[in-house]
């Protein structure tokens, strides 16, 4: 249920309303705009008398929300959420008109590799650096990442370049190792690891949530709700392709998810064309298409030597190819869907 308050509500009436609602076991999410305040009621509102609330002088409108996700719902929070990453001169923002590109190798392989790539992507225009320390692989015989050493190398690259780092967590047992990580990524395979999501909801750190291989848009939003119900509102959604009958690409990039999510949620949405296609020649056109569709950012895999990469070399761009993609995306941005002219 949503309660829209009139401008400058009488404080005593507001306090009485809040006290009454909380006495019914409801949580209240506030969204304050320039002229209006929206109260989102979270919990079982079946017994709440809408007519009684509507009759209050301080209330302009009352509506029931049928969607099961509340915190992530745009009805609760009409303004776009802007997620702030990093601090000081290295601070970047995602959402609400702030577009960012996250770039780096699929996996951290060595100090030389990660620092060389980090410097290259920053020079080309990336605002954040990605790199896998823990790697979920389909085969148990594939490279599983450098783990703790990989996180140390990411921190070293961060010191060298100033780029905030994004890397994936696999399990709750790894959480203490992520102190220096700026954005914790939840991969597609963990999108419905609800115990992990609940624990991440208690952190004061941005979470990048990737859509599962076979997950619906509503399921993605419900996973975001798990994080946000723990009071962590800094969630970034990522469309990375879904599994279909098509075999010509690694996955099928669901570009329609971008405008659909823009209607349903206030959270930023980025797109990963690298994992979606699995083919480096397709990354540029899909990055351009995602930008035109209104995405708030991109996540692109970049490697200094893709032919010898230990993980996902065929979908990785060389630094000069990445720089070309950035230029193409920057040319499209002013004309992207939803961008204010």
Image (cartoon, helix red, strand yellow):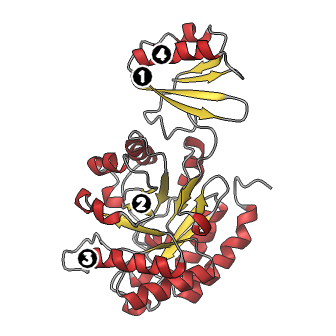
Farthest residue in the right direction?
A: 341
Q: Which mark is residue 19?
A: 4
Q: From the top left corner, tell me how far across and down residue 33 is, in percent.
A: 67, 35
C-alpha distance separating marks 2 and 1: 36 Å
Q: Which quarter of the rendering shows the C terminus?
A: bottom right
Q: Could you say which is closer to the camera, residue 53 or residue 323?
A: 53
**How much space separates mark 1 and mark 3, taking CA atoms?**
44 Å
Residue designated by label 2: 242
Image quarter for residue 9?
Answer: top right
Camera-side mark, 2 or 3: 3
**Comparing marks 1 and 4, which lies closer to the viewer?**
4
Query: Which residue is more in the foreground, 13 or 198?
Result: 13
**CB under 8 Å between discs 2 and 3:** no
Q: Which residue carries the number 1 mark?
A: 26
Q: Is residue 192 left or right of residue 61?
A: left
Residue at the spot x=44%, y=92% of the render?
305
For marks 2 and 4, give the one nearer the viewer: 4
Which residue: 63% across, 63% down? 99
Question: Contact, CB < 8 Å: mark 1 with mark 3?
Answer: no
Q: Which of labels 2 and 1 is toward the front? A: 1
Q: CA distance from mark 2 to mark 4?
A: 45 Å
Q: Which residue is mark 3?
A: 144
């Amino acid at each position: 249920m949503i309660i829209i308050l009139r401008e400058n509500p009488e404080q005593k009436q507001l306090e009485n309303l809040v006290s009454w609602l909380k006495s019914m076991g409801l949580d209240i999410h506030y969204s304050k705009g320039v002229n209006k305040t929206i109260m989102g009621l979270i919990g079982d509102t079946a017994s709440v008398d809408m007519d009684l609330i509507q009759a209050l002088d301080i209330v302009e409108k009352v509506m029931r929300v049928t969607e099961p996700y509340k915190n992530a719902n745009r009805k609760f929070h009409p303004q776009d959420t802007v997620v702030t990453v990093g601090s000081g001169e290295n601070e970047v923002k995602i959402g609400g008109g702030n577009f960012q590109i996250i770039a780096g190798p699929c996996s951290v392989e060595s100090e030389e590799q990660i620092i060389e790539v980090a410097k290259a992507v920053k020079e080309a225009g990336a605002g954040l650096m990605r790199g896998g320390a823990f790697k979920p692989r389909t085969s148990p015989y594939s490279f599983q990442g450098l783990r703790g050493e990989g996180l140390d190398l990411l921190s070293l690259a961060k010191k060298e370049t100033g780029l905030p780092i994004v890397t994936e967590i696999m399990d709750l047992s790894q959480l203490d190792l992520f102190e220096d990580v700026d954005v914790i990524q939840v991969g597609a395979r963990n999108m419905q690891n609800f115990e992990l999501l609940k624990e991440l909801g208690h952190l004061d750190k941005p979470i990048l949530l990737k859509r599962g291989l076979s997950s619906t848009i509503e399921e993605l939003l419900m996973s975001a709700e798990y994080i946000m119900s723990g009071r962590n509102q800094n969630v970034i959604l990522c469309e990375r392709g879904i599994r279909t009958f098509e075999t010509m690409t690694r996955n099928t990039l669901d570009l329609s998810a971008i405008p659909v999510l823009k209607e349903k949620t206030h959270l930023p949405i980025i797109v990963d064309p690298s994992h979606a296609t699995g083919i480096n020649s397709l990354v540029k056109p899909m990055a351009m298409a995602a930008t035109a569709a209104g995405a708030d950012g991109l996540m692109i895999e970049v490697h200094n030597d893709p032919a010898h990469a230990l993980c996902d070399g065929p979908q990785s761009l060389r630094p000069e190819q990445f720089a070309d993609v950035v230029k193409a995306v920057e040319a499209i941005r002013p004309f992207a869907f939803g961008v204010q002219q």
